[in-house]
Image (spheres, rainbow, N blue to C red):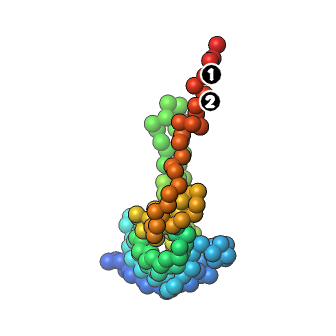
Amino acid sequence: MIIQLDQIKDHGTTCHYRLAPHDFPDASAWEESGDFKLQAPINVEVTLSRISGLIEVRGRITTTIDSTCGRCLKDFTFDLDESFDLTFTNEPLTVHDDGVDDEEGVELSAEDLGLIPFVGDSIDLTEAIGEQFFLALPVRPLCSVGCQGLCPYCGIDLNEKKCHCAPPDFAKKFSALKNIKIN
């Protein structure tokens, strides 16, 4: 996913990609974890435009993924549809923050400002888009927002049946503390 800067037109340039997980760096660990399995290629659409020496990238990532619910442990499929904005710069930027009390201030780099530095006449979007894809994945995927999960005592799926386990009595756990006297 290398873009030559001279390919970016004045009104912007749009590119479409169909990717597999192995197209991203660090994807082998993701595939081995077994938390997610792609059911469709990863579709990426990006629009690049030049703004005052910066390259603005607006994009959208879509695909279909199989996963396991973090509450009830059932397999389910969900559609991932995430948009992102990135800004690239090839100019060495340093900004002095004079809001500090000392005379020197703080020097901020391009990365500190949220810009992605690049060198040369092209931008490789692979790593940046890979990061956006991995950031879009849910930390704890849920089959539905209202999933009740499993009973922690008997293991019954609370979405299907109601269990008869008594809820924990937190008052009993702390009853031993009521007699403590601190001198």
Q: How many marks?
A: 2
**Which residue is denoted by mark 1 in the rendering?**
180
Assign a secondary structure to mark 2.
Answer: helix
Q: Is residue 33 left or right of residue 103?
A: right
Q: Is residue 114 above or below residue 75?
A: above
Quarter of the image that includes the C terminus:
top right
Residue pictured at 36% horizontal, 77% vertical: 12
In the shown orientation, is residue 75 left or right of residue 81?
right
The residue under label 2 is which amino acid type?
A: Ala
| Contact, mark 1 vs mark 2 (Cβ under 8 Å) | yes
Tell me how far mark 1 sits from mark 2, CA to CA.
8 Å
Work out whether 135 lies above or below 36.
above
Question: Measuring 49% from the left and 35% from the top, which residue is drawn there?
Answer: 100
The residue closer to the viewer here, 51 or 75, is 75
Residue 70 vs residue 120, the one in the foreground: 70
Question: Local crowd at mark 2 within 10 Å, few (<14), some, or many (≥20)?
Answer: few
User: From what the image shows, is residue 163 above or below residue 26?
Assistant: above
The x and y percentages for residue 178 are 57, 25
Q: Is residue 35 left or right of residue 93?
A: right
Image coordinates of residue 60 in percent, x first then y, are 41, 75
Residue at numbered disc 2: 176
Of the residues shown, which amino acid type is indicated by label 1?
A: Ile
Q: Callout 1: helix, strand or loop? A: loop
Residue 97 visible? The answer is yes
